[in-house]
Amino acid sequence: MSNLTHIPAEEIIKKINTFLVEEFEVDESKITPGGKLKEVLELDSLDYIDLVVVIESNFAFKVKPEDFADIQTFQDFYNYIISRVNNSKAVA
Amino acid sequence: MNRVAITGLGIYSCIGKNRDEVRDSLYKGKSGIIFDPVRKEFGYRSALTGFVDRPNLKELLDRRSRLMLPEQGEYAYVATLEALKQAGLDPDYIAGQEVGILYGNDSSAKPVIDAIDLMRLKKDTTLVGSASVFQTMNSTVTMNLATIFKLKGVNFTVSAACASGSHAVGLGYHFIKTGLQDIVVTGGAQEINYLSMGNFDALSAFSIHESEPTKASRPFDRDRDGLIPSGGAATVILENWDKAVQRGAHILGEVIGYGFSSNGEHISNPTVEGPVRSLKKALKDAQIQPKDIDYINAHATSTPAGDASEAKAINEVFGAKSTPVSSTKSMTGHECWMAGASEIVYCTLMMQNAFMAPNINFENPDEDSAKLDVIQTVREKNISVFLSNSFGFGGTNSSLIVRKA
């Protein structure tokens, strides 16, 4: 499969951290790959809706709320986004 | 029946962002009306409006609380913070009480329009985000403030058009008078954004005296040509008198009468008979005579028909030239859902500071207002008892009477 529009993972992670800091008003130093997404960002059920919105506005794809079930750490979150972004680019 | 004390006031309006600023504006007769060019571009017949900046709440509230608040909710939060502080009701005390909230609000247009626009564009409801539903409901102010301040008593919104805030105070008075609650946060909130008033402008109800914004609102004046929309929020803390005294609260005034009525006639045209019944019911409830009222804060919004009807009603109940009258809407514009509560704040500030605010821009009376004692310039006079009128679309009327503590 061609991957001509591949976006480097570092670039995606930087973008994710930027919108998480902005949207959830968390200190960037608290975001570490092994950290728990829910606990560090203090997410409640409503916050997951806002997470769907910021992902859509930053990466132009829609996350199903149930996709969050397997995402525990920031690394899980990065992997999920990287995979969705680069798979959709590859298909395109 | 319990006596009902006012122990806290908060105000965020186009004539000031706190009690002291508002007191000074009322004394000086300062207008808060501006010309808003955005309204003209949007197709408004009149671009006049009251205006106040939105407060910066970042240092005061967490992210989730701020997300949930629409514009008028922000105003209501700031006003309530000021009122609770004056009343000496801190979070620890509130935690041990059953404090209620009854607040007037009758629209949340901008969040509704923004959400629908986004759904139309994206064809996906999720993308409006988590806060939209909590911002769009009419009860947005009470649901947000009850959550933020952790209130555990009665909790609902009063929607009664331009009498919403007044009825909220009146209902709070009844909840305390009858012993259902000991403390109720009452008030009214009104959004100011350009999206919220277009359909009101469509009725040609607004003044088109755009060349001189501060002179456009001229209640009772012969040359008045319509109201000017405005907004903000006002909070009035009501308490069981005896319990307020017991806890050492400083009492600012006592609500002694609430009158209400419905015209039972046209949806927008005023009547004389409806307000007369409301006035008489308030006086009866307060067990006083018309001569006992020192000052009347009129509903008068600067519309030709509304002001004339109210002038006739006041004349019928109080007699010609008997009681000083002014409409603070000459300065603030019509604060709509908020007005009934804000005018209790304005009058109580006047009562505390021994002056009667002027009805600015009253230059020439018409046939009806000539029979009133309209206050043209500030009067330094004591107020022992005042009455405040509020009337709304659908013929809803409310009159409140407050006595000095």
Image (spheres, coloured by chain):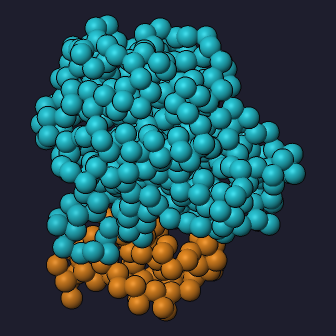
Chain colours: A orange, B cyan
Screen quadrant of the C terminus of chain B: top right
Query: Number of numbered discs present?
Result: 0
Screen quadrant of the N terminus of chain B: bottom right
Query: Looking at the picture, how far across and down is residue B30, in whole percent?
Result: 46, 16
Query: Which of B235/B168 is in front?
Result: B168
User: In the rendered image of this protein, does residue B240 appear above or below residue B403?
Assistant: below
Residue A15 placement, left or right of B384: left
Residue A16, image quadrant? bottom left
Residue A59, image quadrant? bottom left
Residue B73 placement, left or right of B227: right
Residue at 67% x, 41% y is B254
Query: Which of A73/A51 is in front?
Result: A51
- Answer yes or no: is residue B232 visible: no
Query: Which of B293/B80 is in front?
Result: B293
- Answer yes or no: is residue B224 visible: yes
Residue at 24% x, 40% y is B270
Residue at 31% x, 18% y is B369
User: In the rendered image of this protein, does residue B206 appear above or below residue B214?
Assistant: below
Residue at 33% x, 26% y is B311
Query: Which of B303/A47 is in front?
Result: B303
Query: Looking at the picture, how far across and down is residue B209, in whole percent?
Result: 20, 18
Query: Looking at the picture, how far across and down is residue B130, in whole percent?
Result: 42, 70
Query: Looking at the picture, how far across and down is residue B247, in whole percent?
Result: 86, 51
User: In the rendered image of this protein, does residue A48 appear above or below residue A19?
Assistant: below
Residue B120 placement, left or right of B182: left
